[in-house]
Amino acid sequence: VSQSRYKQERLIESQKLENVLKDQELKEIDKILEGQEKERLKIANDLHDNLGSILATLKLNFQNLYSRKNDSENGQELFNKTNELIEEAYQKVRGMAHAKNAGVIGSEGLVPAVQNIAKKMAIPGKLKVQVVPFGMTKRFENAMEVNLFRMIQEILTNAIKHAEASEITVSLTQDEDSINIIIEDNGKGFNAKNIAKKEGMGLNNITKKVEQLNGTFNIDSFEGKGTTILIDIPL
């Protein structure tokens, strides 16, 4: 009886230690994500406050100079082209500053951010990346949107690196109490049991983050038959 009780106590202690380690790991992931967002925010603010103000002043000075220039045809063309370049540079800096958290803020939100990354990842004639939203009419907290965006970005990156797919579809569905994300590709697929070895820490981190959000993360993949990844997060 004593030996049986000893084994039971050891098992309980082992489970406690496992839970502590899991909590520590999740906290570390949170720290990494928080650090990334703080760094992006700092860069965005620096761009807007420093380079943005310089470009704004340059544009103002240039407009004053333009009003005093001679009226030669060549000079006017040069001024017009230069003015367009300054405006483009200024708008890009403003866009970067307002698109901190990869666009998952302000008036944009999760769907436009995913559509934007999908557009950037697509390769004409070689890779089509489609985003299909259903019922995505409400905004989430910024932290939630950032987490979801990072997950989708990581999965898309893995699909492009490893799947050799020509089509990827991201379906985003929101109902009253949950959000469902399905990412499908027509690539070569893999044995889902070997996911940890195959994909490194990327999807492992996603699995842990989904678990922390009380959600579910499933992979349906077979060699030669593509991959479907499903994420369900309660709201």
Image (spheres, rainbow, N blue to C red):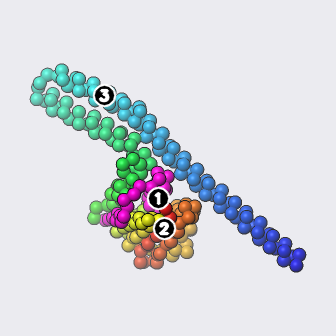
Q: Distance from label 1 to label 2 (Cα)?
A: 11 Å
> Given contact means CB atoms under 8 Å apart, are the residues at marks 2 and 3 in contact?
no
**Residue found at x 36% / y 66%:** 134
Rendered position, 80 above or below 142: above
Q: Does the magenta stretch include residue 157?
A: no
- Dot 3, crowdedness within 10 Å: few (<14), some or many (≥20)? some
> Given contact means CB atoms under 8 Å apart, are the residues at marks 1 and 2 in contact?
no
Disc 2 target residue: 232
Q: In this view, does 89 lie to the left or right of 223?
A: left
Q: Distance from label 2 to label 3 (Cα)?
A: 49 Å
Which numbered disc, 2 or 3, marks the residue closer to the eye? 2
**Residue found at x 32% / y 61%:** 123
Disc 3 target residue: 58
**Residue found at x 81% / y 70%:** 9
Which picture quadrant has residue 161? bottom left
Residue type for callout 2? Asp
Q: Is residue 71 left or right of residue 102?
A: left
Identify the magenta region.
126-155
Q: Where is residue 128 in the image (x, y as percent from the top left)?
A: 32, 65
